[in-house]
Amino acid sequence: MTEERPGFNFNTISDFLEGYKSGKITPTQVATNVINALEDADEAVIPLRAIVQYEAHLIMKMAEASTARYQANEPLSPLDGIPVCLKEEIKVVPFHHRVGTLYLGEEQETEDATITRKLRESGAIIIGVSNMHELGLGVTGCNVNRYHGVPRNPYNPHCFTGGSSSGSGAAVAAVTFGRISSIGSYPLSYSTVSLGPICTSVKDAAISYAILAGPDPDYPYGLQQPVVNFNNIGSPDLKNIKIGIDWKFFKDCDPEVLSVCQEAVQYLKGFGATLVDVHIPELEEIRVSHTVCILSEIRQALHVDFNTQYNKMNLDTRATLAVASNFSVLDYIQANRQRSRTMQFLKEIFNDVQCIVTPAIPCTALPAEPSDFVTGCSDFHTLFHTIRILSQRMANRHQLLLQFHLQPVGVAAGREGTGSAHAQQLYRAVNKVIFEGRRGVWVVVDRGFVEVMADYKEAPLASRPQTLDPREYLELSPEERRAQEERLAIRARLKLQYLSQLNNPNRTERIEDPALTRWTYARSLNHIYPNFRPSPKTSLLGFVCGVAPLFILYYVFKTDRDRKEKLIKEGMERPFNLTS
């Protein structure tokens, strides 16, 4: 079984299978322990709220069937008897498909999602559906509506779990686009969101991935995928593996995170892997493009909901969707152009390396304020910082996320093992994610984050879209930057207020035009607009510039008309002469 370590101890699929086959434990006993744990979590002083919907009798029914199969020595798959939960974004019979909201899933589901069906066919024990950030629109996992509640971090209930799969993360303590069918999952963002397993080990993720992946006739994105191949994934030889690292990107994270990441990378190097310095161009542009793409698609998918269910949404969800309303069709097109550029950049990098190792997110578990558990939390700073790493998946590359456990001061994340254990996990990850024999794998290590620098060099032989050129906003004086930030903040606040009122179906008050409000504000506090000074002189100039062109045009047309009439009259009075 799993070696005892300080903090939380996780049993892997191999541990369960060993116990089932030896008869030391049965799926029925495991299910009983799971039910007791769920009931204890609900009755605790601070409820965990990891699993929001479950039925004890259904858990026992699946467990008893699995026990009978093991007794007959006829297990269905390596997942037979393994307890699993699914994010509430995925349809699971007979639970409500609420997607973290109050208004969706009013009726119980009668049809499983494709991924749910595969788990049932493999004999897994589906214990229920897990909590999530409302509509997946956040990275804290904070969901305060009455059906869900904020899932608590099991290492420290006063910290967030992270999101949007907050309940899944709390229950468990790899993303592959197109490999796993998303049929039966709520369609929020078709080009940037994909399904994948969250497991206690890389080996478990590989097993789950092999079972869940595969073509689905109803899911066109995955019809042409290659067959999963696990040959030689346990080989300790990494001499032919080249790992790409953008060190400027890699090192810009918290010191305790960086030390673990560097130790893991050096461990890989000790197995013969070659470290290659790479440069990932236009990281800031990638982050902006990913933000525009994912929020535009989610806003479009929730257009009706935002207009009809506005009052039932959490406050942070309203704010995020209101921000997404600012993006135009041209913004979305430009963002996808940047996506194409990014895919080309990565294609060139993966000609030289098999995988890229990067940090994951900027920090460990974020502390929560007491008010966050009542009114919710909107943290755009953390959201956009986190998106910078996750934006790499917008290029539709394979990605495996490894969360190592740290114990920094004041942050509860519980150390699971020594640094070498973390490195071994990364080694197994690199060994497994290349099992298909194809390039283009992202291994995201630990919880670090890079602040993209303005001096990143330009990509060779590729022009930068003008609207994404950082020189447009980096080569500004401090005074110009402050003035610009103030103007943008005012406009954003007024537009957010206007859109919130405009999209509120129950509004009773009169809606003020933000353009008129902004003009009035500029006249009264003209230091925000330093080039505009309302005065008699500027008023006179405005009148002259507005009215004078009208008189000029009238004079030009009148003069031309008089000239033509004169010529006509002269032609009519002139005597007719064939020789003239």
Image (tube, rainbow, N blue to C red):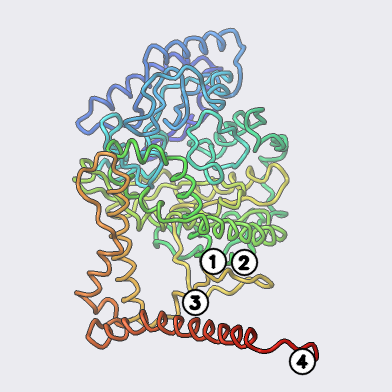
Q: How far apart are marks 4 and 3 (CA)?
A: 69 Å
Q: How far apart are marks 1 and 2 (CA)?
A: 7 Å
Marks 4/1 in contact by CB < 8 Å: the verdict is no
**Crowding at mark 1 (Cα within 10 Å: few <14, some 14-19, many 20+):** some
On residue 277, the disc is: 2
- Mark 2 is on which residue type? Asp
* Residue that numbered label 3 is attached to: 471
* Residue that numbered label 1 is attached to: 247
Q: Where is residue 29 in the image (x, y as percent from the top left)?
A: 42, 15
Which of pointers 3 and 1 lies earlier in the amino acid sequence? 1
Give the residue at x 58% y 67%. Answer: 281
Give the residue at x 67% y 27%. Answer: 217
Marks 1/2 in contact by CB < 8 Å: the verdict is yes
Q: Position of residue 258 (x, y in %)?
A: 45, 60
Vertical order, 54 against 299 (above or below): above
Q: Nearer the viewer, mark 4 or mark 1?
A: 4
Q: How far apart are marks 2 and 3 (CA)?
A: 26 Å
Q: Nearer the viewer, mark 2 or mark 4?
A: 4
Give the residue at x 39% y 25%. Answer: 105
Q: Is mark 1 on a helix, strand or loop?
A: helix
* Residue that numbered label 4 is attached to: 580
Which of pointers 2 and 3 lies earlier in the amino acid sequence? 2
Q: Which of marks 4 and 3 is in front?
A: 4
Q: Distance between the residues labelled 4 and 1?
A: 89 Å
Asked whether residue 267 appears in the rendered view, the answer is yes
Q: Is mark 3 on a helix, strand or loop?
A: helix
Vertical order, 387 against 73 (above or below): below
